């Protein structure tokens, strides 16, 4: 399985580096191989700038919606979208080591003259994923910048911002994904025995063999490197032509792919001799089957080509493709590479989006140092939810159950003055229906409402403390949990509304 995974990943790399087989395209592919060699351990500096005309974007979205002939198209008005022209620039510095599958990336965002520090992101297959607290604080400041209707919102008040900054300052690093939650890839088993160079050579050979006679016409030689330029329609036509080429040259495609897969398997660390032999035998069987059923192979490629051509005739798809253009230049510079790419979306002569990405990559022996003593995302969430409840307390809960006859689980929805900024107010919980009466979990409901629940072990009685007074909440006990009737929450001063809907589900609303 590890060999199959490695082969699949290399295959994906092939698709990402797509090129035809003209002399210029093969030369570009050879330079791409040099780039991949450089990327193994490198430093990268880059900028991305997005210029968006939101008024033009609203018009484009409305035109596309109308072209789909959906009812909502005529009613689309762009409600909730920003207006006017806005520009956002992202600057980043990255240290990357593909041999250990680690990188760190520090980045800043500048919006309308205001610069925001978004800290550093750390990734390691062996250690997890981390960010600095500056990352969340910067993201909050960006949200504050872009929110159109925030004047009366608790989450952008000076007091809330001060408390949020204090919470984030308690820990320098935040663990977003623990190593236990990573994919569990064995690096020693996943990396090639002799480095990645032989695999890159296999990729080049694969393209020379599988696409012999196929040209994209999109790669041009320029001073110091190569340029690629295409619009949406040309990219779509390229995909159709590629499918047609595959359908006309099944043996060439099958032979080249088998040779490539065989080289990949030879380069990956071997398991036991028996495992290696079994894997090669299985692969040989798969390709033998492909050759025996080449007519089915051809038919599948032809069907995909016909289906794609049908999609491209759709007015909305054609409109999107007509709007898009892409340009990129890649040059070898010193001990590395430099690239400039631009993406444009235009509608009815108006520039909707212009995105420019520039990067400079230099081969370098880098070491990625992962953070220590980080707070887990779960522990941070508890702190943020407490802050949420302070400024935007829950004023009620709504329980719904009985969907499809299920009376053992209920949807739980919290009600606040504003929608929660941190986390979600939607959850589910158990409940009990006995003798036609619904019993809700006391602690779950009270925790949501901010009430304090206690337990008297001598009498097996749950209770709630309010203003120094104890209010007993007797009901049912199941698996050590207390369930109380819906109406019993009226003892705590809440208004309870119970509804049995015609659709068959039940609803209980408990409000202050």
Image (cartoon, helix red, strand yellow):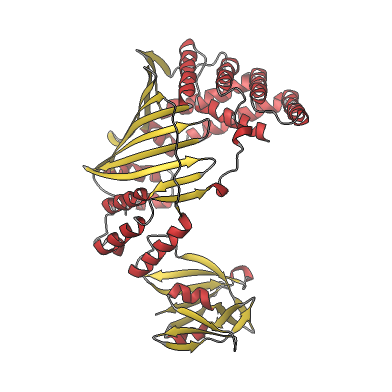
Residue 401 is at least partly visible in this image = yes
Q: Nearer the viewer, residue 380 or 428?
A: 380
Vertical arrangement, residue 201 with respect to residue 276, above or below: above
Asked whether, in this view, residue 291 is left or right of residue 325, the answer is right
Vertical arrangement, residue 157 with respect to residue 260, above or below: below
How many numbered marks are there? 0
Q: Quadrant of the N terminus?
A: top right
Q: Residue at x 51, y 45 (%)?
A: 128
Q: Nearer the viewer, residue 139 or 403?
A: 139
- Image location (x, y in percent) of residue 477: 62, 81
- Image location (x, y in percent) of residue 51: 28, 37
Residue 305 is at least partly visible in this image = no
- Image location (x, y in percent) of residue 472: 51, 88
Asked whether, in this view, residue 420 is left or right of residue 203, the answer is left
- Image location (x, y in percent) of residue 330: 38, 21
Picture quarter containing residue 272?
Answer: top right
């Amino acid at each position: 399985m590890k060999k199959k995974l490695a082969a699949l990943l290399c295959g994906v790399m092939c698709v990402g580096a797509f090129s035809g087989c003209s002399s210029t395209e093969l030369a570009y592919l050879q330079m791409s191989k040099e780039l991949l060699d450089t990327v193994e351990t490198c430093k990268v500096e880059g900028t991305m700038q997005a210029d968006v005309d939101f008024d033009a974007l609203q018009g484009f979205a409305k035109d596309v919606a109308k072209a789909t002939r959906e009812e909502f198209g005529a009613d689309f008005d762009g409600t909730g979208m920003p207006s006017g022209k806005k520009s956002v620039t992202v600057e980043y510095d990255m240290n990357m080591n593909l041999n250990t599958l680690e990188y760190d990336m520090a980045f800043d965002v500048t919006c309308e003259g205001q610069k925001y520090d978004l800290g550093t992101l750390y990734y390691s297959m062996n250690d997890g994923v981390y960010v600095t607290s500056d990352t969340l604080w910067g993201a909050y400041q960006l949200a504050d910048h872009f929110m159109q209707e925030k004047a009366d919102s608790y989450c952008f008040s000076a007091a809330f911002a001060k408390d949020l900054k204090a919470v984030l300052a308690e820990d320098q690093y935040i663990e977003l994904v623990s190593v236990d939650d990573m994919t569990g890839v064995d690096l020693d088993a996943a990396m090639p025995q002799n480095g990645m160079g032989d695999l890159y050579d296999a990729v080049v050979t694969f393209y020379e063999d599988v696409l012999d006679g196929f040209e994209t016409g999109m790669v041009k030689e320029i001073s110091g490197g190569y340029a690629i330029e295409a619009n949406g329609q040309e990219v779509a036509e390229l995909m159709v032509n590629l499918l047609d080429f595959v359908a006309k040259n099944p043996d060439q495609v099958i032979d080249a792919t088998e040779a490539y897969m065989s080289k990949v398997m030879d380069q990956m660390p071997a398991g036991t001799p028996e495992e290696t032999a079994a894997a090669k035998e299985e692969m040989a069987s798969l390709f033998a089957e492909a050759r025996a059923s080449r007519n089915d192979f051809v038919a599948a490629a032809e069907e995909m080509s016909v289906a794609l051509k049908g999609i491209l005739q759709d007015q909305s798809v054609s409109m999107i493709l007509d709007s898009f253009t892409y340009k990129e230049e890649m040059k070898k510079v010193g001990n590395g590479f430099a690239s400039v790419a631009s993406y444009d979306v235009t509608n009815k002569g108006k520039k909707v989006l212009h995105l420019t990405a520039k990067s400079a990559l230099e081969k370098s022996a880098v070491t990625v140092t992962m953070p220590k003593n980080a707070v887990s995302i779960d522990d941070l969430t508890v702190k943020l939810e407490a802050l949420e409840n302070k400024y935007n307390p829950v004023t009620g809960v709504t329980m719904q159950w009985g969907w499809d006859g299920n009376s053992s689980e209920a949807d739980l929805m919290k009600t606040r003055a504003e929608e929660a900024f941190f986390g979600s107010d939607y959850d589910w919980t158990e409940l009990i229906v006995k003798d036609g009466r619904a019993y809700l979990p006391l602690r779950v409901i009270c925790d949501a409402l901010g009430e304090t629940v206690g337990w008297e072990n001598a009498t097996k009685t749950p209770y709630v403390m309010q203003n120094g007074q104890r209010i007993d909440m007797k009901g049912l006990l199941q698996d050590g949990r207390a369930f109380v009737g819906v109406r019993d929450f009226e003892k705590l001063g809440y208004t309870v509304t119970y509804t049995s809907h015609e659709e068959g589900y039940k609803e209980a609303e408990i409000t202050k």
